[in-house]
Image (cartoon, grey):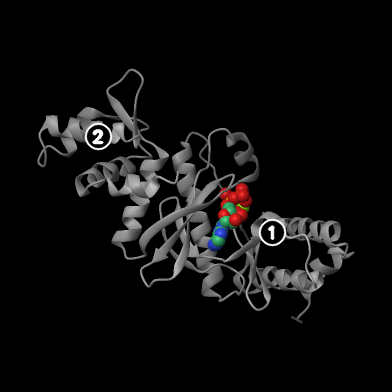
Amino acid sequence: MAKLGELYRRLTDSDMLILEYMVSNIRKYEYIPVENFMKKFRRLWSQKEVIARINKLNELGIVKKHESMDAYRLKIVGLDCIAIHRLVSSNVIKALGDSIGVGKESIIFKGLASNGDIVAIKFYRIGRRSFRHITKVRLYVTNEDSSWLIRSIVTGEREKEALTILNRHGIPGVPRLYGHALHTIVIEFIDGVNLYKVNRIDNPLEIFRQIINIIKNSYRYAGIVHGDLSEYNIMIQYSNDLKPYVIDWPQYVLADEPRALDVLKRDVIQLTKFFNRRFRVGIDPDGIIKHITTSNST
Ligand SMILES: Nc1ncnc2c1ncn2[C@@H]1O[C@H](COP(=O)(O)OP(=O)(O)OP(=O)(O)O)[C@@H](O)[C@H]1O
Ligand SMILES: [Mg+2]
């Protein structure tokens, strides 16, 4: 995966035309017959040239040939390259750096935004193997026949939507969204560690209070419940003070959906359990849920 930037740099504008054509058909065909490519690009290139270009993409491992037919489909790295191309062309990013993390459902790279800010670039990887699990917990994915590339795109769009709403309401402790393309989001880079890796904090109750504040503001002002809150989706930034961030929002639920309150309770219970277990603080989740949904204090 560290080679993604290298792969991207080997692609020309013509290669991108082919890849864009493939992504525009992603909901129609899994494998696109070579004759379709020839028809599509007949004014630009000869049949031989079309075949040579597809072969190049095949050799780079960006597309995959069907076992028996003369037809090709995009591989996930192909989708990555298109997303990078779109993000660069639309002036969201100017550089892709090293990989900084591999999640269960994504890979994350460091990068540079056009204005020079350091950003995190998250490429979704909603894999085939965890499909059954995903349809159970990720209720928003409704089309069971869609390929995992489409599910990755849908998930990227979901996280973009959540962050757009949260940013619009100025909720602190949520990464800023710089841009989005297909299954990829570009967000503020958080220079910190995952909460699950933190074994000691001077004042755990203060950090807990700050996280609950993020959850409360998201619920009350942006109308959003996280839906997968845990020590894995919280990062702690160490600057002068410790500052928590809540990341990874694609499974969000709108506060006016019927199940929102149940999801909120599950989130709070999950977080409380972790703090009680790790930092021995003895927090009662019921009181916290009441505070989020009814009190006016901060
Ligand atoms: N904005 C960011 N800045 C810095 N690091 C980040 C950022 N977003 C994510 N990461 C790193 O990448 C990891 C995976 O991110 P995220 O939780 O969004 O994806 P995921 O696929 O759900 O991963 P996981 O299954 O591990 O939860 C995080 O745990 C964190 O270490
Ligand atoms: Mg996560």
91 or 154: which is nearer to us? 91
Q: Position of residue 229 (x, y in %)?
A: 69, 57
Tell me the residue that label 1 is attached to. Answer: 260
**Is ligand 2 within 8 Å of the beta carbon of the residue shown at mark 1?**
no
Q: What residue occupies the far bottom of the structure in this picture?
A: 297
Residue 95 lies in quadrant: bottom left
Q: Residue at x 85, y 68 (%)?
A: 287
Split into 4 quadrants, where in the image is the N terminus? top left
124 w.r.t. 48: above or below: below
User: Please, is residue 135 above or below residue 103 in the view?
Assistant: above
Using residue 69 as the reference point, say whether residue 277 is left or right of it: right
Q: Nearer the viewer, residue 24 or 261?
A: 24
Residue at 23%, 43% (x, y): give it: 15
Q: Residues within 10 Å of mark 1 (few under 14, many from 20)?
A: many
Q: Is residue 240 left or right of residue 155?
A: right
Ligand 1 falls in quadrant: bottom right
Q: Is residue 230 visible?
A: no
- CA–CA distance in space, label 2 to label 1: 48 Å
Which element type, helix, strand or loop, lies under badge 1? helix
Give the residue at x 37% y 52%: 83
Say what amino acid the circle numbered 2 marks: Lys
Mark seen at residue 20: none
Pointers 2 and 1 in contact (C-beta within 8 Å): no
Does the rendering let one see residue 208? yes
Q: Earlier in the sequence, mark 2 or mark 1?
A: 2
Q: Position of residue 201 (x, y in %)?
A: 78, 68
Q: Which mark is residue 56?
A: 2
Task: Give the number of the mark in front: 2 or 1.
Answer: 2
x then y, percent, for residue 51 = 19, 30
Classify residue 44 by image quadrant.
top left
